[in-house]
Image (cartoon, helix red, strand yellow):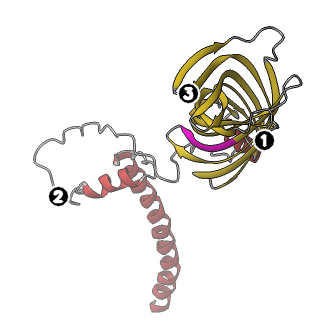
Amino acid sequence: MNKSILFLALVALPVSLSAQTKSAPRKSAASTARSSANRPAVRRAPANPMIMAKASATPAPAPNVPSTAAAAPAPAVVEKPAAATPATAAPVARPQTKTAPVVQAKAVARSGEDSGFRVGFRAGFGAGSVSGLNAADLGGAQIDPVTGFHAGAVLSFGRRAFTVQPEILYAQYGFKAVAGSNYLQFKFNVIEVPLLLKYTFGQSNARFFVNAGPTATYLLGGTLSVRADGETGEAPIEPGPNDGRVNYGGSLGIGAALQAGPGSLHIEARGTYLTSSDSDGNLLNGKLSVGYLIPIGR
């Protein structure tokens, strides 16, 4: 009997174990379904540092704590748009700087230079004389210079060392034949037109120059002064149409140019030699003048 009971127990034991094994998974599946049905659906928030910071700052409800009041529905949380992170921020447009070509820079530099055209004036004093006369024709008289003044307009063309400088001047020429206390003086009023080629050298604020070129004069008139035996007198010189109004020759000068304000101040010493086909003598004139030239245009 004991063997029969032991045999029955051995047979019943695997059956009971298999029944327990089958019921346990069914129960866990049902409990899992019930727990999933009771659990509210959680919406997955976007992976954003700002939202995760807010979620971590909100205190979580205490687990397994019975609530005496009815659970009120949670208010809807309006999420503010998160600021763009450096990784997702739109790139800032930066102005593109282009280097100007060298040709454009040269064009701008050239446009800033002066046009090479200058206008101004010059004025000063001079002394005139004559050469080529015989002493016998003058009766043994001595030739002395006669002082006068000159003034007029000056033009200049060119930016380099060599420039062209035409002028229109009113000038006085003359000479005096002196014998003791007596004298005979000629003073001529002329329009002088030199056309000079000028070479300038030196620094920008202090330069030196040399000029030379042909010169022509047109006789306007003059004055004849006489002193004889203590008496003096004057008479106008009125040249006729055939009296050699036009004289021609050349001029040579040297001077300095100093920068002064918008233009340059010119100090010059110049000599002029004139001759005429219908005269025995040649007129000489030396001038010391001051001028001022202003550049016009860019």
Quarter of the rendering occupied by the C terminus: top right
Query: Which badge, 2 or 1, is on the more N-terminal residue?
Result: 2
177 or 110, which lies in front? 177
Residue 127 visible at all = no
Residue corresponding to mark 1: 212
Is residue 162 toward the left or the right of residue 47 in the image?
Answer: right
Residue 43 visible at all = yes
Residue 229 is tagged as 3
Residue 65 is tagged as 2
Q: Nearer the viewer, mark 3 or mark 2?
A: 3
When asked about the image quadrant of residue 134, the answer is top right
Give the class, few, some or many, for how many residues have Cα within 10 Å of label 2's Cα (few <14, many ≥20): few
175 or 29, which lies in front? 175
Q: Which residues are magenta?
A: 263-270
Query: Which badge, 3 or 2, is on the more N-terminal residue?
Result: 2
The three-letter amino acid code for the residue at tag 2 is Val
User: Marks 3 and 2, how far apart in space?
Assistant: 152 Å
